[in-house]
Image: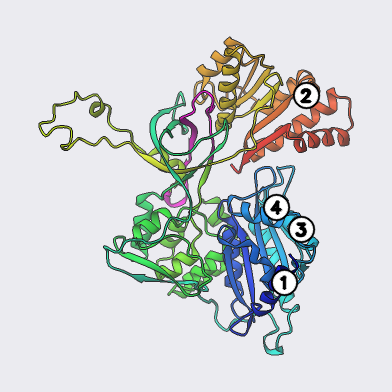
């Protein structure tokens, strides 16, 4: 290890500068695209500094080369209960390897910005782990460790953190006086830093590269509406066949779905920017170290459909980049205003609250003339969306069930609509017409080798991600399930499995379920199934909160408080708690459990809070939450 470390140190010394300028590498680990957007904005803001700055996805980064880098900015999100994002799993494994020498990072200057959500007990655990581990390994932190809270406005947290970033980093290098100051631009805007070019190729050119994301194909074989009334929305039950997909899953794992943008949105963007959807292009790296974001050659339609998140709300850094390509000074000033610190309130109102996507913003500023190469650099990548599987792998080993809330908002300014990219992509998948499937088979005069009618079943690109949601090792352990709305998904999977265990003659502990919806006659999901489980004894206690069926709104946390004495007995007997749904609900449910422990466990507020925290750390209080 000693010789290897010595070689790395020599490499670090030789790679510290690019074209005579110190190199700063922004390493990002993103799950939803936010960290990626922040990383790109750091690259954009570095123009005019004395540095060569590049952003690298941790999924494509060779972690063993980290000690050779002179200066690194980590922008890393925390996923779930304190873990790394999918893209950062391998990097996390490398960095936490106990066999790394204590001084292996002694030549690396670094800083960290972590992204998290305070609803979780292990808030920003990934960013904190990277920060502390880099210090343990001898790294030199050159700027304060920053944290963003997705429960509030993470964009403002990031803007506040990076305010003095380049000035601080400049002070760590022996730079000529003329370039040691933070950048001062003579122009209002500057173009993105390009890492690759886009060139047109013949339409028959075939791609020689493989997709960068490993995925399998699953076939949609069943879909049905779960709501009793769709007046206020739609929730679908979907079933995917994975018999020939080459993947397996465990109960309540996550299904990662690679969506595609709405064809209408793709055409809107292509029309506004005058892109030829049928044109075929190829990405050409400008540097050997550059990792391309997706495989090419590909049509522009494919790029806009499968690889760029056209449906995302533009971050401020992206608005600044777009402003460079506004040929109208009015449009340019407006975009820069929205991206500025002074325009914080306007950005919140006009972009965030109004659910404006990249497509909406591009259409709102008709003077934009953006080359395709710049557009690809500016936009975030289209990320997989994760759905907790609502089936038991014991009961349905070759079928994956998904409980899908279709996101659609129509009461927006200018008559606009916002539609969730993945939920609407899935909702539009059409099964073969029943009349075609039931049509009698006609004798084929050409024999079995002749032409056959193809019945097309829709398929999706997908992967499986292991989940923290796991039933206790012993089925005798009592469980408390809290899953309002589509948060019922993993609870349904658990009920299937505990029912199967009970049917097999095993002793199954008490199972409590707290479900919530608006109205019993409108969106009581899986009502018949739940009542059947209750009748069979699999579900020992079922409590449903109908928030709009009474004068006073009732939510699951209210029912938990009402059952506080009985629930305390379950916890005292070693019971597990599972919570799935929106982050605000998760916060309220957490408070309700702290209160019931305080009241019925005869503890102080401090001791009750610590008791629930201990449940979380011991994986007896498990949450899977998302921003509503």
Task: Say which element carries label 2.
Answer: loop
Give the Cα distance between marks 4 and 2: 29 Å
Residue 153 screen position, x and y as percent:
65, 53
Q: Which residues are magenta?
A: 387-416
Q: Nearer the viewer, residue 589 or 5?
A: 5
Q: Which residue is mark 4?
A: 126
Give the Cα distance between marks 3 and 4: 10 Å
Is 163 drawn above or below residue 435 in the view shown?
below
Q: Which quadrant of the structure image shows residue 328?
A: bottom left
Residue 352 screen position, x and y as percent:
56, 53
Instruction: Report the quarter where the C terminus lies.
Output: top right
Q: Which residue is mark 3?
A: 133
Is 495 drawn above or below residue 594 in the view shown?
above
Task: Say which element carries label 1.
Answer: helix
Q: Which quadrant of the structure image shows residue 146?
A: bottom right
Sequence order check, earlier mark of 3 and 1:
3
**Of discs 3 and 2, which sits in the foreground?**
3
The label shown at residue 164 is: 1
Sequence order check, earlier mark of 4 and 2:
4
């Amino acid at each position: 290890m000693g010789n290897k470390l010595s070689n790395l140190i020599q490499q670090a010394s030789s790679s510290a500068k690019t074209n005579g300028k110190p190199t700063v590498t922004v390493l990002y680990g993103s799950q939803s695209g936010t960290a990626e957007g922040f990383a790109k904005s750091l690259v954009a803001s570095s123009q005019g500094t004395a540095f060569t700055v590049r952003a690298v996805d941790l999924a494509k980064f060779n972690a063993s080369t980290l000690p050779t880098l002179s200066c690194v900015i980590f922008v890393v999100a925390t996923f779930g209960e304190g873990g790394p994002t999918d893209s950062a799993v391998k990097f996390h494994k490398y960095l936490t390897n106990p066999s790394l020498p204590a001084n292996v990072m002694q030549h690396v200057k670094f800083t960290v910005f972590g992204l998290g959500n305070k609803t979780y007990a292990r808030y920003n655990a990934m960013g904190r782990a990277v920060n502390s581990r880099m210090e343990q390994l001898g790294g030199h932190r050159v700027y304060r460790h920053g944290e963003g809270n997705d429960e509030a406005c993470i964009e403002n947290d990031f803007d506040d953190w990076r305010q003095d970033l380049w000035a601080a980093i400049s002070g760590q290098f022996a730079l000529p006086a003329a370039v040691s100051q933070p950048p001062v631009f003579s122009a209002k805007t500057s173009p993105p830093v390009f890492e690759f070019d886009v060139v047109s190729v013949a339409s028959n050119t075939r791609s020689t590269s493989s997709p960068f994301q490993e995925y399998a194909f699953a076939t949609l074989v069943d879909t049905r509406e779960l709501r009793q009334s769709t007046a206020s929305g739609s929730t679908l039950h979907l079933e995917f066949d994975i018999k020939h997909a080459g993947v397996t899953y465990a109960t309540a794992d996550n299904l990662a779905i690679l969506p595609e943008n709405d064809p209408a949105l793709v055409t809107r963007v292509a029309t506004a920017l005058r892109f030829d959807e049928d044109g075929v292009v190829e990405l050409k790296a400008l540097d050997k170290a550059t990792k391309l974001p997706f495989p090419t050659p590909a049509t522009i339609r494919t790029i806009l459909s499968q690889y760029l998140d056209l449906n995302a709300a533009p971050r401020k850094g992206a608005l600044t980049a777009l402003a460079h390509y506004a040929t109208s000074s009015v449009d340019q000033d407006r975009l820069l205003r929205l991206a500025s610190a002074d325009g914080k309130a306007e950005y919140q109102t006009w972009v965030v609250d109004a659910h404006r996507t990249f497509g909406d913003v591009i259409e709102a500023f008709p003077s934009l003339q953006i080359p395709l190469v710049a557009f690809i650099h500016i936009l975030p990548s289209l990320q997989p969306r994760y759905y907790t599987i609502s089936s038991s792998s014991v009961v349905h080993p070759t079928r994956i069930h998904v409980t899908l809330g279709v996101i659609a908002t129509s009461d927006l300014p200018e008559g606009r609509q916002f539609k969730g990219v993945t939920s609407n992509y899935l909702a539009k998948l059409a099964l073969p017409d029943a009349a075609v499937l039931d049509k009698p088979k006609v004798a084929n005069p050409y024999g079995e080798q002749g032409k056959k009618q193809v019945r097309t079943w829709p398929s999706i690109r997908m992967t499986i991600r292991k989940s923290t949601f796991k039933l206790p090792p012993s089925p005798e352990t009592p469980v408390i399930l809290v899953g309002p709305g589509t948060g019922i998904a993993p609870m349904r999977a658990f009920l299937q499995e505990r029912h199967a265990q009970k049917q097999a003659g095993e002793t199954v502990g008490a199972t409590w379920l707290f479900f919530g919806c608006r109205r019993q006659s409108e969106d009581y999901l899986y009502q018949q199934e739940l009542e059947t489980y209750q009748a069979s004894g699999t579900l020992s206690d079922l409590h449903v909160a109908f928030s709009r069926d009474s004068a006073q709104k009732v939510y699951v946390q209210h029912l938990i408080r009402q059952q506080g004495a009985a629930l305390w007995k379950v916890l005292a007997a070693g019971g597990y708690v599972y919570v799935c749904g929106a982050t605000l609900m998760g916060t309220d449910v957490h408070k309700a459990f702290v209160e019931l422990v305080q009241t019925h466990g005869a503890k102080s507020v401090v001791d009750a809070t610590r008791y629930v925290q201990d449940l979380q750390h011991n994986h007896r209080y498990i949450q899977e939450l998302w921003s509503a």
